[in-house]
Image: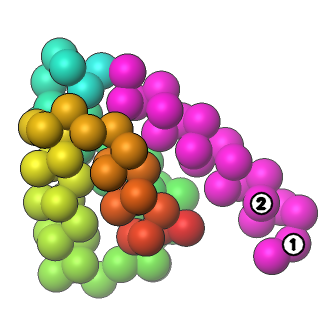
């Protein structure tokens, strides 16, 4: 991966960590914001069924307040 791609991914992970700070307040909003982050960065990465699938997985992990699982799912889906 070239330097620009690595920088983009690093910035996405920082933004993801910022979003995860709100996981306790509203897991639903947190999951939605995380999906929007990934979709905005990589709009053509996922088809609609995959978007729904990953949103549901991220939402469940957010409800469980498991930030590590959210990071793992986000990485699989978008990075």
User: Circle 1: is it few (<14), some (14-19), or many (20+) Cα within 10 Å?
Assistant: few
Give the spatial CA distance, label 2 vs label 1: 6 Å
Secondary element under disc 1, as helix, strand or loop, is: loop
Magenta range: 1-21
> What's the residue at 60%, 36% (across, down)?
14
Instruction: Left or right? Give the position of 42 relative to 26.
Output: right
**Quarter of the rendering containing residue 3:** bottom right
Q: Is residue 69 left or right of residue 75?
A: left
Q: Which residue is denoted by mark 2 in the rendering?
A: 6
Question: Mark on residue 35?
Answer: none
Residue 9: x %, y % from top left: 66, 56
Q: For the C terminus, give its image quadrant.
A: bottom right
Residue 34, percent across and down?
A: 34, 45
Residue 78 vs residue 61, the one in the foreground:
61
Q: Is residue 50 above or below residue 40?
A: below
Disc 2 + disc 1, Cβ < 8 Å: yes
The residue labelled by disc 1 is 2
Query: Residue at point 23% right, 78% down?
Result: 50
Residue 44, compared with residue 34, is above or below; it is: below
Image quarter where the N terminus lies is bottom right
* Magenta span includes 8: yes
Residue depicted at x 30% and y 21%: 22
């Amino acid at each position: 991966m070239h330097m620009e791609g690595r920088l983009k991914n690093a910035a996405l992970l920082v933004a993801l960590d910022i979003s995860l700070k709100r996981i306790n307040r509203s897991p639903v909003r947190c999951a939605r914001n995380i999906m929007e982050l990934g979709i905005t960065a990589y709009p053509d990465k996922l088809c609609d069924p995959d978007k729904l699938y990953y949103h549901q997985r991220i939402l469940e992990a957010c409800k469980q307040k498991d930030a590590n699982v959210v990071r793992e799912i986000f990485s699989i889906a978008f990075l």
